[in-house]
């Protein structure tokens, strides 16, 4: 199923051709290392570097007999060489080749993911600048709270993805290690200098210590960080789905010319991309448990992890790459409706300003308990009017709540009419936007 979600660049990194190419890179780096240490003659090293190749069909044919993929691979490579083939795979074990090669694949895949994330954050930043002061209502528990801006929503997404970016950069460093430490990791048959030479040649660091494998906590951390990234991306997708609900309709996915929303209802414009992203993120998170379970292997190693990684590594990276690209496109083309945001902001007849009134009363010597009672009593009247279908605004554009507050003689006596009206100004809620943006985006 993951093939459906594969973008070509990432897909190519996890093809059979790419896997065996990575193995061959390790084997050639090994030969070069032995040559530098004086074991392999220059002529044999040159022949191997020039002529060594593999044939996937031949590997498959040999593996049917050997039941061992690395032996099938090295046999295929040996068939492309002469007597110098005796130096291929010299002194190392299968996992030395495989794990070091997989590090190359993960490293290159992570670089694509990091690029995807930077591109996504740049799009979010652009939309945040566009909607820096676009007023909308903030919601908690799904209920209207106080005015915010859509730019602040986008700023939170940008900042959150920045944390994931830094975490994945750290994971990239942790996974970019190789090993040429031999069958039990004791470096008995391969000098430590060889391991360092080979890893340097491949752009990796040698694992400080290994047994027969690179330790799988490194893999688990990568998968866990991708899963955390997916959770934040799903959060964004769910928010967009909510904003597109007909009753809300503050934003919606771009609807292409000729696009169809429903086979039965021609009017439908559904948040299909957001829903797809939600599903993809669930799949990405599902790879965490097997990655965690791969950490505990028997003694110096078993191969219970091998079959698992044939699924979770390519699927995690291919799915994450596709998901990030889809999310970037969704946000880039997202249609935002500021007028509907303002309409919804006024939907509760000014109740969103209740805290503003509440905070004025203690300044006049009123206890918080008494202040809360005054403000809430008037607010409950508004809820009742709205339930009965009364308009949230009168013909003068005054909200129901403002009308009730101005009719409360005790409140007017304490604060004054003008001070009450000032509490209903939206600018009060956007006064810190510039400062927040400086913290998030810099000067």
Image (cartoon, grey):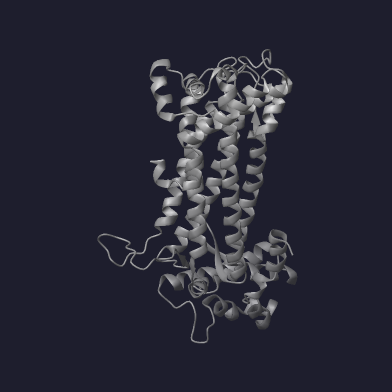
Residue 114: x and y, percent? 60, 48
* Outermost left residue: 264
In the displayed structure, 390 sits above or below 198; it is: below
Residue 78: x and y, percent? 51, 21
Question: Residue 176 lies in what quarter of the image?
Answer: top right
How many numbered tags mark residues here? 0
Pick the front one: 309 or 362: 309
Q: In this view, does 268 lie to the left or right of 79?
A: left
| Residue at 33 percent of width and 66 percent of height | 258
Looking at the rendering, in which quadrant would you find the N terminus? top left
Question: Residue 124 lies in what quarter of the image?
Answer: bottom right
- Residue 100 visible in the picture: no
Pick the front one: 338 or 84: 84
Pick the front one: 19 or 316: 19
| Residue at 33 percent of width and 61 percent of height | 261
* Outermost front residue: 43
* Outermost bottom residue: 396
- Residue 107 visible in the picture: yes
Pick the front one: 345 or 220: 220
Residue 34: x and y, percent? 68, 21
In the displayed structure, 194 sits above or below 111; it is: above
Looking at the rendering, in which quadrant would you find the C terminus? bottom right
* Outermost top residue: 188
Residue 173: x and y, percent? 67, 37
């Amino acid at each position: 199923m993951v093939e459906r979600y594969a973008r070509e660049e990432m897909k190519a990194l996890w093809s059979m051709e790419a896997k065996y190419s990575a193995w061959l890179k390790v084997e050639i780096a090994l030969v070069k290392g032995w040559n530098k240490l004086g074991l392999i003659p220059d002529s044999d090293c040159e022949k191997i570097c020039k002529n060594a190749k593999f044939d996937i069909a031949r590997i498959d044919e040999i593996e049917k007999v050997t039941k061992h993929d690395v032996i099938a691979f090295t046999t295929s490579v040996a068939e492309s060489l002469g007597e110098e083939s005796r130096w291929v795979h010299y002194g190392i074990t299968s996992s030395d080749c495989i794990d070091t090669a997989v590090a190359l694949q993960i490293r290159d895949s992570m670089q694509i993911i990091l690029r995807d994330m930077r591109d996504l954050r740049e799009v979010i930043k652009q939309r945040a600048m566009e909607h820096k002061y676009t007023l909308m209502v903030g919601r908690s528990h799904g209920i209207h709270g106080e005015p915010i801006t859509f730019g602040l929503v986008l700023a939170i997404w940008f900042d959150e993805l920045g944390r994931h970016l830094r975490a994945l950069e750290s994971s990239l460093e942790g996974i970019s290690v190789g090993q040429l430490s031999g069958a039990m990791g004791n470096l008995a048959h391969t000098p430590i200098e060889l391991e360092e030479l080979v890893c340097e040649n491949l752009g990796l660091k040698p694992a400080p210590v290994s047994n027969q494998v690179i330790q799988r906590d490194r893999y688990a951390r990568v998968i866990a960080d991708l899963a955390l990234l997916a959770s934040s991306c799903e959060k964004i997708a769910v928010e967009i789905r909510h904003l597109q609900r007909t009753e809300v309709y503050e934003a919606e996915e771009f609807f292409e010319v000729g696009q169809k929303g429903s086979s039965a209802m021609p009017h439908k414009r559904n948040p299909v991309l957001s829903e797809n992203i939600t599903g993809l993120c669930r799949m990405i998170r599902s790879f965490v448990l097997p990655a965690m379970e791969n950490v505990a292997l028997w003694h110096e190693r078993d191969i219970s992890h091998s079959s698992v990684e044939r699924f979770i590594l390519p699927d995690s990276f291919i799915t994450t790459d596709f998901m990030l690209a889809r999310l970037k496109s969704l946000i880039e083309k997202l249609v935002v409706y500021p007028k509907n945001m303002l309409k919804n902001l006024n939907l509760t007849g000014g109740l969103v300003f209740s805290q503003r009134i509440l905070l004025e009363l203690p300044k006049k010597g009123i206890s918080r308990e008494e202040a809360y009672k005054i403000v809430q009593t008037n607010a409950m009247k508004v809820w009742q009017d709205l339930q009965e279908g009364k308009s949230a605004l009168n013909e003068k554009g005054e909200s129901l709540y403002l009308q009730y507050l101005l009719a409360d003689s005790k409140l007017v006596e304490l604060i004054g009419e003008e001070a009450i009206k000032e509490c209903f100004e939206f600018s009060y809620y956007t006064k810190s936007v510039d400062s927040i943006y400086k913290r998030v985006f810099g000067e």
